[in-house]
Image (cartoon, rainbow, N blue to C red):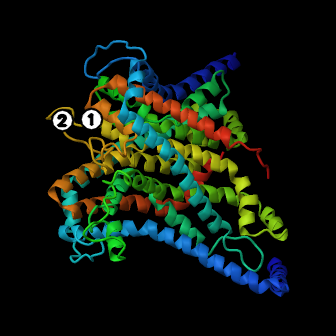
C-alpha cells in the first residue's frame, strides 16, 4: 500500500525536477562533473590505501634482488618460502607470546572494567564522581609521562619480561577507555529489570553476573574489539617492559616488537622477502577481524566517542 | 534491621567491585604519573637507588638542550599540520561519501559505493604502528626498490641515477612522517564525521536545497557548523597523537631511537627515551615527560577555547 503511494510521488518529483526550465541541463551536467570529480578523489584515496598494502604482500613472493631492483617488478616465484622462513625467524613465537598475553589481558580487562563501570554507573555513593573521573582521566595523558616510573615499578615487582607483568599493565592502561565506554552503556540499561531481580531475592553480585552482564553484551563486544585491536597493536609498553633481563632470560617479544626486530635483522642479512612476509602474516589476522566485525567497530567507535 | 544489613552489604559490594580495578589502575597508571613529577626534580640515573634533589635544574637544562628544543619545534609543527591535513581530508571525503551524490530527485545522499569507501578507508586504522613503520620504510626506500621512487622513476619525474632520499633528506623527513600519520588517520575521522553527518536530520538539508544552496554552500553553511563539536574533539585527539610520534620516528629514521638525519626528525618522545634508556638520565627524562604533559593540557584547553562557538541544537 505504502509503496504504491510512494512510487508515483517520487516519479513526479523527478519529473518536476527534470522539467524545470533553463536550469536542468546546466544543473545536470554540473552535477555530473562534480560527481566524476568527487568519485575521482575518493577512488584515488582508496588506491592510495590499498596499493602499498598489496605491493608489500607481493614483495613476499619476490627475491631479494627483485625487491632491491625496481619497485614495479613482478614477483617471479609464487611459493611460500619467505612465509616459512619468517615463521622460523620467530614470527610464530611472537604470535604465540602475543596470544598468551591477550588471552589473559583481554578477558581480565573486560571483567574488571565492567565491574568498576557498573558500580560507578548504577550505585550512587559519596565519591562516585571522583572515582569515575579518576578512571577516565587516564586516557588524557601521554603514556610517555608514566614510562620511567612504570619501568621501575614493574622491576620492583620482579615482573620485567614476564607475561603476568605485561598482562597487568595492559589491563591497567585499558581501564580508562573500558570504564568510560561501559559506564555509558550500563546507564542505558532499564532499572525495572534490576528491581525485578532484587524482588526475586538476587544478591547484587548475582544480578551483575546473571542479569546485567548478559544484557550488556553488545557493549561488551564493541569494547572487546577495541581492546583486542589496542592491545594487539601496542608497541611502547612491551618495548620497555619485555626485554630479556639477563643472558639466560628468554625473549618474549610481542608481535609488534618482533616485527621491528625482524626489520633490523633482515636489514643486515638482506632477506627482505622474509620481512615483507612477516608483516603480511601480522596484517592478515587484523584485516580478517576488521572485515568480520566492521559494523560493530564503526558503530562502537561512533557511540564511544561522540558523547 | 534487615535494611541496615542490606546497606552494609551494599557498601561491601561496591568496595568489592572497585578494589581490584582501582588497585591495578593506581599502581600502574596513576602512581607512575605522580612519581614522574617527583623524579623530574632529581638527578636520578635510574641505575642507582640514590639520588639528589636538584630543584628546577633539569628544566633549566631542558631549555638549553638544542636537541630537545628542535624536537619541541618539530612537535609543534606536527601539531599544526597533522590535525589540519587530516581533518580537512576527512571532512571532504565524509561530505562526498554522505552528501556528494546529489541526484536529480533532489535528495541528499552519498555517492555510489559509499559503504565500500568507508570500509577501505578505515583499513589502516587496524594496522599497528609497527606494521606502518615497516610498510612505509619500504615505500620510502631511497633506491629504485622503494614504491615511491620506483613510481616516480617510471613516470620519468625522477632520475634513476639519483633517486630521492626521502627519509635521509633533512628537509623531507618530517613531512614524510606526517604523510604516514595522515594516511593512517583519515579513515577513522571519516567514519567519525560520517556518523555526525548522518545524525543531522534530512530536512535540514532539504530546506537548504529548497533555498537553492549549492554543494559548497550546503557544506560551509549547514554541515560544518553542525559538525563543529566532532571537529573540535578530533583536533584534540590528533594533537595528542602529534605529541607522541614515538613509534614512527624511532623505527623509520636513523639514529639511536631515531630522530635522524642529524636530529631533523627528532620529537620529544624519542629524546625522552634516548635519555632514559641509553644515556641513563631518568630524572632528566621525567622532566621531559612533564613538559609533554603540560603541553598536551595547554593544547586541549587552547583548541577547545579557540574553536568555541555557540552550540547548535537540532
Residue depicted at 73% across the width and 53% down the height: B225
Q: Chain of mark 1?
A: A
Where is residue B166, by image quadrant? Answer: bottom left
Give the CA separation, mark 2 to mark 1: 8 Å
- Nearest the viewer among A298 and B45 is B45
* x, y percent for residue A65: 18, 69
**Which residue is at the front of the view, B87 or A121?**
B87
Q: Chain of mark 2?
A: A
**Disc 2 + disc 1, Cβ < 8 Å:** yes
Residue that appears at 20% across and 55% down: A267
Mark 2, secondary structure of its residue? loop
Residue B74, percent from left and from top: 44, 43
Q: Which residue is mark 1?
A: A161
Say few, some or many: other residues with alpha carbon within 10 Å of mark 1 (under 14 / 14 to 19 / 20 or more).
many
Q: Position of residue A50 (x, y in %)?
A: 43, 68
Left or right, B51 with respect to B296, comes to: left
As drawn, is A16 to the left or to the right of A91? right
Q: Nearer the viewer, residue A24 or A62?
A: A24
Mark on residue B78?
none
Residue B89 lies, in percent from the top left, at 57, 60
Q: Determine if residue A160 is in view.
A: no
Q: Quadrant of residue B65?
A: top left
Q: How many marks?
A: 2
Check disc 1 and report its element: helix, strand or loop. Answer: loop
Task: Answer above or below: position of A201 versus B159.
Answer: above
Residue B278 at least partly seen: yes
Q: Which residue is mark 2?
A: A249
Q: Which residue is nearer to you in this view: B130 or A123?
A: B130
Amino acid at each position: 500500500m505504502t509503496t504504491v503511494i510512494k512510487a508515483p510521488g517520487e516519479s513526479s518529483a523527478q519529473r518536476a525536477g527534470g522539467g524545470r526550465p533553463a536550469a536542468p541541463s546546466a544543473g545536470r551536467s554540473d552535477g555530473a562533473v562534480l560527481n566524476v570529480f568527487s568519485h575521482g578523489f575518493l577512488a584515488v584515496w582508496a588506491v592510495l590505501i590499498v596499493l602499498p598494502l598489496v605491493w608489500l604482500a607481493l614483495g613476499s613472493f619476490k627475491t631479494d634482488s627483485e625487491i632491491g631492483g625496481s619497485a614495479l617488478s613482478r614477483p617471479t616465484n609464487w611459493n611460500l618460502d619467505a612465509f616459512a622462513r619468517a615463521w622460523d625467524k620467530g614470527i610464530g613465537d611472537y604470535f604465540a607470546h602475543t596470544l598468551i598475553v591477550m588471552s589473559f589481558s583481554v578477558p581480565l580487562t573486560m571483567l574488571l572494567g565492567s565491574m568498576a563501570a557498573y558500580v560507578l554507573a548504577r550505585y550512587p555513593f559519596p565519591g562516585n564522581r571522583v572515582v569515575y573521573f579518576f578512571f577516565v582521566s587516564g586516557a588524557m595523558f601521554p603514556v610517555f609521562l608514566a614510562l620511567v616510573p612504570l619501568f621501575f615499578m614493574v622491576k620492583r615487582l620482579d615482573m620485567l619480561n614476564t607475561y603476568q607483568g605485561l598482562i597487568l599493565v595492559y589491563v591497567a592502561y585499558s581501564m580508562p577507555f573500558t570504564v568510560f565506554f561501559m559506564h555509558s552503556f550500563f546507564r542505558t540499561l532499564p532499572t525495572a529489570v534490576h528491581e525485578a531481580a532484587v524482588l526475586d531475592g538476587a544478591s547484587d553480585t548475582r544480578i551483575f553476573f546473571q542479569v546485567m552482564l548478559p544484557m550488556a553484551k553488545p557493549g561488551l563486544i564493541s569494547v572487546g574489539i577495541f581492546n583486542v585491536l589496542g592491545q594487539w597493536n601496542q608497541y611502547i609498553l612491551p618495548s620497555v617492559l619485555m626485554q630479556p633481563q639477563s643472558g639466560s632470560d628468554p625473549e618474549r617479544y610481542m608481535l609488534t616488537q618482533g616485527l621491528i626486530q625482524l626489520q633490523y635483522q633482515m636489514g643486515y642479512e638482506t632477506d627482505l622477502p622474509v620481512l615483507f612476509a612477516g608483516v603480511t602474516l601480522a596484517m592478515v589476522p587484523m584485516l580478517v577481524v576488521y572485515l568480520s566485525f566492521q559494523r560493530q567497530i564503526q558503530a562502537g567507535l561512533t557511540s564511544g566517542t561522540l558523547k | 534491621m534487615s535494611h541496615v544489613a542490606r546497606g552494609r552489604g551494599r557498601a561491601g559490594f561496591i568496595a568489592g567491585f572497585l578494589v581490584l580495578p582501582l588497585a591495578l589502575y593506581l599502581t600502574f597508571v596513576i602512581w607512575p604519573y605522580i612519581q614522574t613529577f617527583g623524579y623530574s626534580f632529581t638527578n636520578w640515573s635510574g641505575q642507582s637507588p640514590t639520588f639528589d634533589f636538584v630543584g628546577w635544574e633539569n628544566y633549566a637544562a631542558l631549555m638549553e638542550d638544542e636537541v630537545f628544543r628542535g624536537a619541541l619545534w618539530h612537535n609543534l609543527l606536527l601539531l599544526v599540520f597533522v590535525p589540519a591535513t587530516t581533518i580537512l581530508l576527512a571532512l571532504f571525503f565524509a561530505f562526498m561519501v554522505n552528501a556528494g551524490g546529489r541526484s536529480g530527485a533532489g535528495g541528499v545522499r552519498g555517492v555510489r559505493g559509499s559503504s565500500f569507501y568507508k570500509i577501505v578507508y578505515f583499513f589502516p586504522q587496524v594496522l599497528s604502528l609497527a606494521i606502518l613503520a615497516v610498510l612505509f620504510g619500504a615505500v620510502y626506500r631511497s633506491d629504485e626498490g622503494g614504491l615511491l621512487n620506483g613510481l616516480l622513476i617510471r613516470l620519468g619525474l625522477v632520475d634513476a641515477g639519483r633517486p630521492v632520499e626521502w627519509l635521509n633528506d633533512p628537509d623531507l623527513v618530517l613531512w614524510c612522517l606526517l604523510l604516514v600519520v595522515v594516511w593512517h588517520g583519515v579513515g577513522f575521522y571519516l567514519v567519525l564525521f560520517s556518523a555526525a553527518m548522518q545524525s543531522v536530520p534530512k530536512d535540514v538539508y532539504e530546506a537548504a536545497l529548497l533555498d537553492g544552496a549549492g554543494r559548497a554552500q550546503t557544506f560551509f553553511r549547514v554541515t560544518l557548523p553542525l559538525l563543529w563539536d566532532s571537529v573540535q574533539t578530533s583536533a584534540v585527539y590528533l594533537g595528542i597523537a602529534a605529541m607522541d610520534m614515538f613509534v614512527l620516528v624511532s623505527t623509520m629514521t636513523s639514529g639511536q631511537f631515531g630522530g635522524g638525519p642529524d636530529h631533523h626528525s627528532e620529537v620529544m618522545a624519542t629524546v625522552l627515551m634516548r635519555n632514559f634508556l641509553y644515556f641513563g638520565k631518568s630524572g632528566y627524562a621525567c622532566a621531559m615527560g612533564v613538559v609533554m604533559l603540560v603541553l598536551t593540557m595547554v593544547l586541549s584547553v587552547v583548541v577547545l577555547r579557540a574553536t568555541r562557538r555557540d552550540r547548535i541544537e537540532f
